[in-house]
Amino acid sequence: MGKLEIPGKLRPYVMAHRGNLVHCPENTLAAFQRAVDDGADVIETDLHVTADGHFVCIHDAAVDRTTNGRGAVRDMTLAQIKALSAGAGWPEYADERVPTLDEVFALVPAGIVVALELKADDFLAPETGQRLVAAIAAAGRSDGVVLLSFTAARVQAVKQQGEAAGCDLPAGYITYTRLVPKGGVELLGPAWPLLFLNPLYVLMAHWRGQPVCPLDPTPDKRLWYYKLLGCDAVLTNDPGATQRALGRS
């Protein structure tokens, strides 16, 4: 895959933000399946670690917003989290559960990249990084995963463990504030207003070999600008609609 190369796919790649969260509850197997069916090139999800060391795909540090339970993810066992409905606010999806990373890997076809946003400082721990790298390798995804975070140290810590295991995992940095590309990472996710404040951002990143995906969950009305700049991927809450806006379906 290199830094972000998806054979047979057109740029800008379409990255499904937490699956398709317009039509399904976010970060559920239903949302990821919908995104796959929509033709997404990349499935983005968020990663936390349970009290008993399992990797689960949920955005918030607590289960309160997206499930019918309460409490911090890191204080709950996998069994406790699996007992909750992840279809909060979606009666038709009441049976959805918070998925494990292994379940997401099993669902998403091998030709689709999985982008993992590391949401907690647990990933700074070498042992956690080693276990994540091992899980990625066991699923046969070493060439189909990218790491993302607003905290560069998290992705660098896991990347270091990957390198020690002979696995090169591209590290991506997301930012709301940095007007120029950050060095030392392979991928960049600037919040979309930054690309208007600095129209040379993508050019500067490409000069250093860094692909760019704007942080813009509703990108369709700005696709013309992202294509003009040469953005490598676009994030979207509704990958089917974005594919249509790109004229691909």
Image (tube, grey):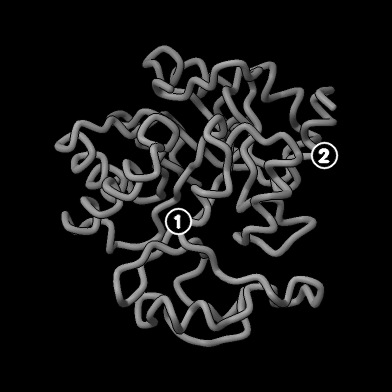
Label placed on residue 241 = 2
Task: Give the position of the C terminus as an image quadrant.
Answer: top right
The spot of residue 229 in percent (x, y) is 62, 18
- The residue lying at 25 percent from left, 54 percent from top is 131
Q: Quadrant of the N terminus?
A: top left
Question: Is label 1 in a helix, a strand or a loop?
Answer: helix
Mark 1 and mark 2 in contact (Cβ < 8 Å)? no
**Residue 91 occupies which quadrant of the picture?**
bottom right
**166 and 19: which is toward the camera:** 166
Question: 56 or 196: nearer the eye?
Answer: 56
Give the class, few, some or many, for how many residues have Cα within 10 Å of label 1's Cα (few <14, many ≥20).
many
Q: Residue at x 48, y 79 (%)?
A: 81
Left or right: where 166 falls relative to 224: left
Residue flagged by tag 1: what amino acid is it? Leu
Question: Residue 101's mark?
Answer: 1
Report the residue that reaches farthest toward the top.
207
Q: Relative to 180, does residue 160 appear above or below in the rendering? A: below
Dot 2 amino acid type:
Ala
Q: Could you tell which of marks 2 and 1 lies nearer the N-terminus?
A: 1
Query: Can you give x and y, in whole percent of width and height, for residue 40 in the image?
Result: 67, 36
Q: Is residue 91 left or right of residue 28?
A: right
Name of the residue lying farthest toward the bottom? 70
Classify residue 161 by image quadrant. Answer: top left
Q: Is residue 86 above or below residue 105?
A: below
**Distance in Å between CA atoms under marks 2 and 1:** 26 Å
Give the class, few, some or many, for how many residues have Cα within 10 Å of label 2's Cα (few <14, many ≥20).
some
- The image shows residue 236 at horizontal and vertical percentages of 69, 43
The residue that appears at 77% across and 73% down in the rendered structure is: 90
Q: How many marks?
A: 2
Residue sitting at x 49%, y 61%: 57
Residue 140: image location, x then y, percent = 39, 37
Please tell me whether mark 2 sits on a helix, a strand or a loop.
helix
